Image (cartoon, coloured by chain):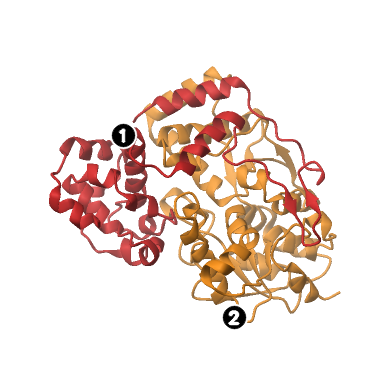
Chain colours: A red, B orange
Amino acid sequence: MGITDLMSMAKPNPESRARIFSKIRRRELANCFQCVKCTSGCTALKLLELKPHEIIRLVDMGFVDELASSDIIWTCVTCLKCIQRCPQKASPYHVIIALRNLAVEREAKVPEPFLKAVSQILETGMAEAVQKVVTHRAVTFDRESLGLPKIVVPKDTFQAAFLKAMEEKL
Amino acid sequence: MKVAVFWGCCILTSQYSYEISVREVFPKLAIDLVDLHEENCCGDPVKSVNDFAATYLSVRILALANQTGLGNLLIPCNRCHFAISEAKKLMENDDRIHEKMTGLLKEEGLSYNPDIKIWHVIDLLHDMVGLKSLKKATAKQLKGLRLASHVGCQLIRYSDLGRPDDAELPSKLDELIAAVGAESIDYPEKLDCCGAALTRSHPDSALSLSGTKLKVLQTLNIDGLVVSCPECGIMFDTKQKDASSTVGAKLNMPIVYYTQLLGLAMGISLERLGLHLNQSPVEELLKKIPA
């Protein structure tokens, strides 16, 4: 089902709209005049049919709940061309990030690797697990055999502070 | 001169060739790198989950940099550089965020310093070291090498944030390539994204972005692609074979980090530049380098 189909059944929700507006802070979303520069340069347009100008308009009209539970917000490549080229200082990138945060708060479907990154950070401080590298000559190297310094995991106080930060819903 | 360095997860957990070459090249240019103590993720992947917590992770890196007592922080990853630059700007402009962040840092016994200057490999070499000194440091000029540059997205956008190079017409990496005697060609797809950020939600589409760009590059009669971001390195070098099958082509494009290329011009051995760790066929590029 496309976004347009979703909208035909939906009602605007002013409260959700206000949440996104507060999340994106001073960005001038309401100034968007639909010039479509963002969409015409969007990396995810050809591949995954992301249309940033539609997202901006839908949020402004209050169709936030539908977007927060839609897959489309997870197609953004975060190449930042939309915000760079917007003549009105509306930032589709920041709106999409705000929608993703709302999706997480509402426990909508969120691609699992994002949540895995959070748990990995809690465990080791890093978002990725340490890997070995195999060369063309089939020799396996790790940090130690390459003579690279050992990674030191942050103390428990880091975990506590990060968890506290995760509780904030600005 | 001493400069603090924050590597970020991609470099520390897999892009060892970048780390090795940065560690090798900078001291030879009279820049000694000081690692942060107990570093964490820059926060970028967390932005999609909780923007506030992501900002905390970024701010914490600046606080760790403050611990070193140094005024300059090198961040060789585009994405980390972007996340931390955004957090820094937020700390400057949003009193509420500033108050909450400094409170959290205090619980960890850390403190924030607004005066730390953030650098990437590209502007540190181009603006701080300078092209003249760089040329002087080379033992041989890499004449005859025809290369393409890939700057990456987050290093140049968005301009309001203050980025190391121009958003639509970046030139510093090309000038750096020219400084070691190689040619950096111009091509229409120069600003096309590597796709790395889609890996967590649409891994196949991510590979089709990197694969499509590599396919175009292979028609340009070049000796290799120069990158300067570990995520771009993962997409173009580490995952080049996976990208081949995604776009249905045989991809065999040598990919090198700029610091590896610079190291070659400085006469440093292949292993000390981590060139044995690249997954793409870098031997093809090495063959073209004049003895």
Question: Disc 2 marks which amino acid?
Answer: Leu
Task: Tell me how many marks there are.
Answer: 2
Circle 2 crowding by C-alpha within 10 Å: few under 14, some 14–19, many from 20? few
x 60%, y 20%: residue: A156
Label ID, residue A1: none
Residue A71 is left or right of residue B277, and the answer is: left
A61 or B117, which is in the foreground?
A: A61
Q: Chain of mark 2?
A: B
Residue B113 visible in the current orientation: no
In percent of width and height, residue A75 lies at 39, 54
Secondary structure found at label 2: loop
Relative to B237, residue A140 above or below: above
Q: Chain of mark 1?
A: A
B128 or A152, which is in the foreground?
A: A152
The C terminus of chain A - image quarter: top left
Residue A151 visible in the current orientation: yes
Residue A125 is left or right of residue B49, and the answer is: right
B114 or B170, which is in the foreground?
A: B170
Callout 2 touching callout 1 (CB < 8 Å): no
* Badge nearest the viewer, 2 or 1: 1
In percent of width and height, residue B191 lies at 49, 66
x 29%, y 51%: residue: A90
Label ID, residue B220: 2
Q: Are marks 2 and 1 on the same chain?
A: no
x 81%, y 46%: residue: A146
Secondary structure found at label 1: loop
The N terminus of chain A - image quarter: bottom left
In percent of width and height, residue B114 lies at 52, 33
Relative to B290, residue B60 above or below: above
Question: Disc 1 marks which amino acid?
Answer: Arg
Check disc 1 and report the residue beneath it: A106
In percent of width and height, residue B90 lies at 42, 37
